[in-house]
Amino acid sequence: MKRNLLLCVVILSFIASGTQAQIAFNNNFETWSNDLPDDWMGTQTTIEEDSVFMYTIAPLSGTRAVKLQNREIPIKKFSTQAFSIVEGEKYYVSFWAKGRGNIASIKAWSGNNTTVSPLIMVNTETWVYYERSFTASVSSDEAELVFEIRQTKAENDDLQIDDVTVYKSAGGAAMIDNIGIYTGMNAGGELFNQVFEVPAGSGNHTVYIANMWMGGISQNSELHVAAQRYGSLSNEFDYSFGPVANNYYKPEYLVKYNRVWKLTAEEIDLHIAHFADGGYEMPEAIANWPANGDEENGEAALLAPFFDGNENEIYEPELGEYPLIRGSMAIYAIFNDHKITHASGGQAIGIEVHAMMYSVYEEENFDLLNTIFVNYQIYNRSENDYHAAYFGSFSDMDLGAATDDYVGCDVDLNMYYSYNANNADANYGEPAPAQGAVFLNHPISHFVYYTNGTGDYGDPEQAPDFYNYLKGVWKNGEPMTYGGQGHGGETPVDHMFTGIPETGEGWTEIGEGNTPGDRRGVMSVGPFSMASGGKICVDLAFPFAWDIDGTHLTSIAMLRQRVQAIQTYYDEQGYICEIANVGIQRPAGNIASVRVYPNPSSGLVFFDLGSTEDAIVKVYSLTGSLISEKHAGSSTFSIDLSACKGMLLYVVADHNGSIIGKGKVFVD
Ligand SMILES: [Ca+2]
Ligand SMILES: [Ca+2]
Ligand SMILES: [Ca+2]
Ligand SMILES: [Ca+2]
């Protein structure tokens, strides 16, 4: 057996501390010595050397893979050379296999064994990708990945393996934990994932899971749909992490994108003020913000939005450049529908989604403290021009106990909401709260609910079912109709249950005396066109309201007021978020609520703060030294910067100290 080989282990180096992504082991079977693959045949190996072959007929990568032969029932082990793991950390294992044979199990050995995967029966003529994970039970520099092989078949050229990677991501999910709702997002863009705890710490939840749906018709009249429902909860995916790319399995791609990025406004402000200071250590998520994609791998050059001080389209946090986030705390993920076969049965659209979940912390602002915001930037990276396209926000709201719920729609507020059929909920007690989902920047074109179950009015099963729900019609194509449970009536409608439960006016579930149940809902925007290279932007809010001195119905009234307040807050931010059918917009370099002009300037720079009348403006050099500080008592004022030349950074804070604007100004 071969030992003492130089390990082909790539350690990515990062500027910052914190949980770090790392490739622990990577090998593609390209280099061999004495007829054995380098970096394999570790201490756990029991397979004979003459049963390990170089495979060159159709390797996955390069010119070589490995072929393993053990045609007997007792297992033989094929293990890597040693690599390092850290106790408690989660590692992903990815590899490809074909041919025929059983991988009885995969273990991570480090003195004892941790199971990475149970039985995998390989029986295919083409390469199949596998991804598994394990959590290290001990820290060790002598870990080995062990494939236990048996029953390989001669007529299928035994079992072939290529491109094995073991890596640690910098965090597959993160949580919003600075407001009254405790929830999060993962690397695949799934929202909430069983945790939408409100009030935070109470153990009670109002939403089980939410995901975005899209559907559209291509220029060839073909339907394309991406409509994930339960994702990791049911192992049914339409999306996976990362941008659209040529190769989704490169170790660099896996380790860079199988994660989320979590940041606070405070961290970014500190970075802006101190990036050049000695001893400053930038947060890991600032250091590794996914601003630039790998163009050689077919990724877009510009991904996550950032302040580009020197306008070279390259993200350089060490120069004081920084991520552009919203709110006080944000979680960012990039995912796509291009990589994997869709569980919904839909044909891939070719979208890449940049999702930001965020919260706004403002003391005693109970509207903001009870709202989760989500921004979606959706890029059409395909060659297709889509028409009759729809965006949907699917959610399975479970208001406390799931089986006694009703839903409703407030068209004026662009909201769908869930409320309890009775005043008492088994989890929340009496009175029950209410939970909403709101479109902040588009009208709610349709709202459909359905109940857990099969049939024409139940769960969608095939791509056309999802598309019909996005269009606001039943699975069988029947229109929704006014009254009852929304079918079989006379008058077609776009939205279900648009009445007012609080007063009994109009069409409501409570008025119809429907059987309460585990409701799921889809609210949609459309139809619109999305050309190749086009982009749509959607802003959502998920507000919660609980009128603890009232009833389950006055909680709905409180929710409506809350949505109005949130809409006002949102409108004041001046975000640009629309459907851009052709051409991709650059991420905005400046926060829009403060206007700075002329830019470039010859020295006298004017500031327009919009509705704000009292602010502190600080101007920094690119190296972080404070050049000018001004207390402005009106919404428009000027600062003379003629003594400075070049690119300058400005930060505007209101009288509470909240940053209301920051950006760059060039003085020449
Ligand atoms: Ca190879
Ligand atoms: Ca730059
Ligand atoms: Ca309930
Ligand atoms: Ca439900």
Image (cartoon, rainbow, N blue to C red):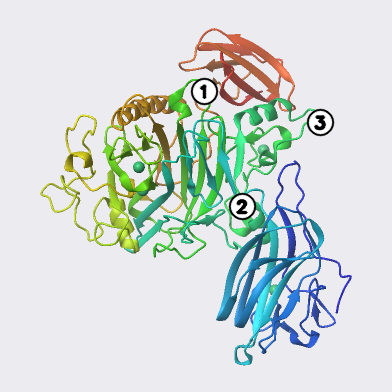
Q: Quadrant of ligand 2?
A: top right
The crowd level at tag 3 (other Cα within 10 Å; few <14, some 14-19, many 20+) is: few
Q: Position of residue 421 (x, y in %)?
A: 28, 40
Residue wearing tag 3 = 279
Answer with mark 2 or mark 3, whichever residue precedes in sequence: 2
Given the current orientation, which residue lies at the most extreme bottom position? 155
Residue wearing tag 2 = 257
| Numbered mark located on residue 362 in the image | 1
**Looking at the image, is 505 positioned above or below residue 650?**
below
Label 2 CB sits under 8 Å from any ligand 2 atom? no
**Looking at the image, is 536 positioned above or below residue 610?**
below
Q: Nearer the viewer, residue 302 or 103?
A: 103
- How far apart, in angstroms, are the residues tagged by discs 2 and 3? 28 Å
- How far apart, in angstroms, are the residues tagged by discs 3 and 1? 31 Å
Which type of secondary structure does the marked residue at label 2 adopt?
Answer: helix
For the N terminus, the quadrant is: bottom right
